[in-house]
Amino acid sequence: MANIISKLQKIFKLQNTELSEQNNKPAPSSLSAHKEILTRPIKMSTMEEAPPHAKNQLNAGYGQSTGLQREHNEDALFTLSTMLAYNESSLPVGLYIVADGMGGHKHGEIASELAIRAMVEHVVKELYTPLFSLSPHQVDSSFQEILQYGILKANKAILAKTEDGGTTITVVLIVGKQMTIAHVGDSRVYSVSPGGRLEALTRDHSLVTRLVELGQISPEEAEAHPQRNVLYRALGQGETFEPELISSTLPLHGSLLICSDGLWNAVSDQRIGFIIASSPTPQNACQELVNEANRAGGPDNISVILIELPNQ
């Protein structure tokens, strides 16, 4: 068993080396600092063992609510935190997804469920099964490729099984000290410092965000823009699109927050950060974040996942 875990640990040395070569800093401080990794298979000969007695567990909480102004919930979420540990070796792996079915489109709640099921099925087949089998073997695709193909499969499933269904999807995959994000739409991933400072790691694929990027409107104008919820990129709305893909090493401290716009549209970054920093556990924080969004009027469905990062 120790040999299996040692092999699993070393499987990620190649991609982590690529990341360190492209990033001088151990954890990027903004979205612009993220670098794409090179695409190549993960080879068994590149695996590296973790330090002895590393406290690297992933601790995640989640919360969800229909909100106060919607009749049903079109959001879906998924969390899976795993740990393979034996003797002095350990490998944390986590998969976390939020999908926000698009209001105003038929079968938004079906689209969000299909998106998550398709993604989970693909990641389990392409990553979890080869890594955690009795005879762990080479994973033939990079983490970015695995998530990209999962999103494309989710898009095809929605197009085939719903009538005009649409959804966002935001996926975070953590393997050891590496984080890979795949993102379509306006759900968000934030890095949260231990003191509660939020930094967005994803970019909204919305009309007003694009107008801000082009300098046609100000961020203040975007907040009150009548088309602020209109997306130009979403699953189920066409055959051809490119998901946003981000790879980096994990931040050294703090948390990762994944949420639908039902949270970030209703609660300020400052308030979100204060709740996270003052909550005793990720689960407590998630429940209080949902409560806070509802206290602000609960205008939309609310989904939130908070991942407490390992001590490194």
Image (cartoon, grey):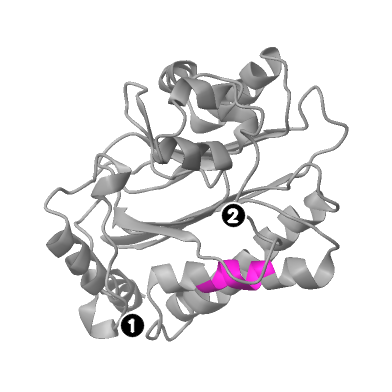
Residue 41 is tagged as: 1
Q: Which mark is residue 203?
A: none
Q: At x 43% / y 22%, what residue is drawn?
A: 273
**Vertical position of residue 217 compared to residue 21: above or below:** above
Crowdedness of circle 1 by 10 Å Cα count: few (<14), some, many (20+)? some
Q: Which residues are magenta?
A: 149-155
Foreground residue, 309 or 185? 185
Q: Which residue is mark 2?
A: 233
Counting from the top left corner in percent of width and height, residue 66 is at 78, 32
Determine crowd level at label 2: few under 14, some 14-19, many 20+ residues with C-alpha closer than 10 A.
many
* Residue 61 falls left or right of residue 118: left
> Which residue type carries mark 2?
Arg
Query: Looking at the rendering, in which quadrant would you find the C terminus?
Result: top left
Q: Which numbered disc flags the more N-terminal residue, 2 or 1?
A: 1
- Using residue 79 as the reference point, say whether residue 163 is left or right of it: right
> Of helix, strand and loop, which one carries label 2?
loop
